[in-house]
Amino acid sequence: MSENRKVIIIGSGPAGLTAAIYTARANLEPLLLEGEPSSTSDQPGGQLMLTTEVENYPGFPEGIMGPELMARFREQAVRFGTDVRTEKATRVDLSARPFGVWVGDPDAAEPTYTAQALIISTGARSLMLGLERENELLGHGLSTCATCDGFFFRDQHIAVVGGGDSAMEEAIFLTKFASKVTVIHRRDELRASKIMQRRAFANEKIEFLWNHVVESLEGENRLEGVTVRNVLTDERSTLPVTGLFVAIGHKPNTDLFKGQLEMEESGYLVTGLGAGATSTSVEGVFACGDVQDHVYRQAITAAGSGCQAAIDAERWLESLDD
Ligand code: NAP
């Protein structure tokens, strides 16, 4: 027998936990599937679990560690009665209401849960290079977010990997802090838009290392350099950088919803399709946070959209009662 709930929230980053706080305080007794522990950003707590110090979340003037911030979000959601379960949704059925949500065996005949309204906050992950020690050095010199971590690299030589708009944007932003930014790109031509290319080329602090890939990360407890390889000559050298920003793109965690919800070509969920900013292509299903935002991608904007999703879901459920 499936367990029926008014609201199920899938995902436990800032968006999902904020949606939980708001729906719990609206007496909707939300069930939140927080995911299962793993070493990637789809673990409970999301991408902030992979960061160290967070200095731009308002309300914490001294800064706060990413995992500590997420623990506090969770505590606040639980305080108001959110039923948080350390489970991962393996299948959803959005073709009829109540919606079906499976945990465990996706081929089970009956869904584990059914829900009147669903809030999706499964987030996104930064694409990584797949190097050894990446997880270990993330937050210790290795970063996927210049806005978050750039400040820690004042007057240092750092590098950015990638040749797209994200890499150019990050490199330009990082010149506010760093003494020098080396863009490491695997080809001799950028993918970034012409205007971003022009800005990057015009910036005196940015230099380009063309036709190179990062092969390994050096340093004991912190990044102290990267070994790069020239893809044309196979020659290896070491770049003595204290920071490496990986900007090779992001992937939203939307595999579960393929064929059921409208998505952009890149996989991000499309929102704002019905009443409310977080409505998706299926009535009663709302999406918030990075799973539907490839522009801002900040904890505070994710939390803000989680609040919107909760209010949208509450209003939608009320409209059913009418
Ligand atoms: P992207 O356009 O897909 O670019 C990814 C870059 O990373 C490419 O240069 C690619 O190299 C490189 N790359 C991919 N995998 C790699 C690997 N394993 N090792 C080394 N390099 C690798 O991604 P994005 O820059 O994140 O942009 C995504 C979308 O958002 C784009 O449509 C972009 O225009 C948009 N965006 C716009 C702005 C803006 O307008 N301000 C800012 C950010 C993003 P190759 O070129 O060789 O494939």
Image (cartoon, rainbow, N blue to C red):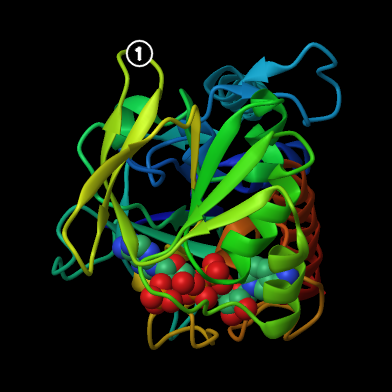
Q: Which residue is mark 1?
A: 221
Picture quarter with the C terminus: bottom right
Residue at 50% x, 83% y: name it. Answer: 261
Mark 1 close to ligand 1, CB under 8 Å: no
Residue at 76% x, 50% y: name it. Answer: 301
Could you say which is closer to the camera, residue 166 or residue 89? 166
Residue at 32% x, 42% y: name it. Answer: 87
Mark 1 is surrounded, within 10 Å at the Cα level, by few (under 14), some (14 to 19) or many (20 or more) other residues, namely few
Q: Quick check: 288 above or below 285?
A: above
Quarter of image, res 55: top right
Left or right: residue 251 compared with residue 26: left
Could you say which is closer to the camera, residue 105 or residue 213? 213
The answer to whether any part of residue 316 appears in the image is yes
Q: Position of residue 154 (x, y in %)?
A: 71, 25
Q: Quick check: 277 above or below 151?
A: below
Could you say which is closer to the camera, residue 174 or residue 259? 174
Q: Position of residue 222 (x, y in %)?
A: 40, 18
Q: Amino acid at mark 1?
A: Asn
